Amino acid sequence: MFITFEGLDSSGKSTQIKLLEEKLISDLRQVILIREPGGTKLSEKVREILLDNKNSEMNSRAEFLLFASSRAQLVSEKILPAIKNNIIVLCDRFADSSLAYQGFGRRLDKILIEQINNFATQNLQPDLTFFIDIPIREITRRREIDGKANDRMETVGEKFFERIRNGYLWLAENNKNRFNVLNGLEGVEDLRSKIWKIVSSKL
């Protein structure tokens, strides 16, 4: 089974994916947890380039193609081999993030993004996707509380992130067979319980 978590930074997705990993392990399931961009030696180097504030001049097309190249390596090296060995794969972001961030956020050609994504992923689709949705103002509040510095992808502004959020909601509406939209304002344990109920029913 291939499960992905999507959402804007500070939405709580990384917390929930880690909790799901722990629950699956306690349930004696074989599982790997990976992130995008990253997850392989090559992909982690691409991640450094993408998030480095020193690369502010990066073109939006170059940005997307770097994400796609990182994704292609991750799918080939880690995800597909794990799936073939009946290992549950949990991925913190996947191809949907490029449609949301570069398609809706950067306003690049969505059809072209989807075509390149399909090429990079060898047409791999998640079995389940969890989108943890929170208002943009809540993201700002959480980041201020945490005192986190913004990376290159987080310095664009609120309108950019509103477009991304709307993109995720559009994807969820058009992929109801696998997308599950969760309210990120709910408590950590409430979200954990809802996610496990959905996952366990599939298992």
Image (tube, rainbow, N blue to C red):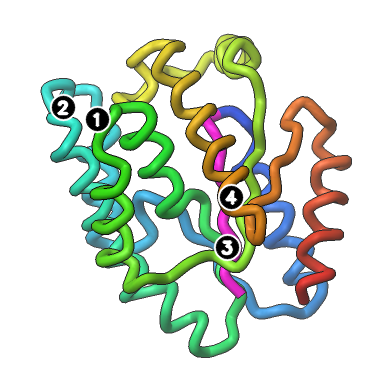
- Helix, strand or loop under label 1: loop
- Residue 10 visible, this angle: yes
User: Which quarter of the image is occupied by the N terminus?
Assistant: bottom right
Asked if labels 2 and 4 touch by Cβ distance under 8 angstroms, the answer is: no
Q: Which residues are magenta?
A: 1-9
Who is closer to the viewer here, 16 or 163?
163
Within-10-Å neighbours for mark 3: few <14, some 14–19, many 20+: many
| Residue at mark 4 to residue at mark 2: CA–CA distance | 26 Å
- Residue 17 visible, this angle: no
**N-term-proximal mark, 4 vs 3:** 4
User: Which mark, by number, is residue 194?
Assistant: none
Mark 3 or mark 1, whichever is nearer to me: 3
Quarter-of-image position of residue 14: top right
Who is closer to the viewer here, 194 or 102?
102
**N-term-proximal mark, 4 vs 2:** 4
Q: Report the residue marked by disc 4.
A: 5
| Residue at mark 1 to residue at mark 4: CA–CA distance | 23 Å
Within-10-Å neighbours for mark 1: few <14, some 14–19, many 20+: few
| Residue at mark 3 to residue at mark 2: CA–CA distance | 29 Å
Q: Residue at x 76, y 64 (%)?
A: 199
Asked if labels 1 and 2 touch by Cβ distance under 8 angstroms, the answer is: yes
Q: Report the residue marked by disc 2.
A: 55
User: Which mark, by number, is residue 52?
Assistant: 1
Q: Is residue 81 above or below residue 96?
A: below
Within-10-Å neighbours for mark 4: few <14, some 14–19, many 20+: many
Q: Is residue 76 above or below residue 186?
A: below
Q: Report the residue marked by disc 3.
A: 90
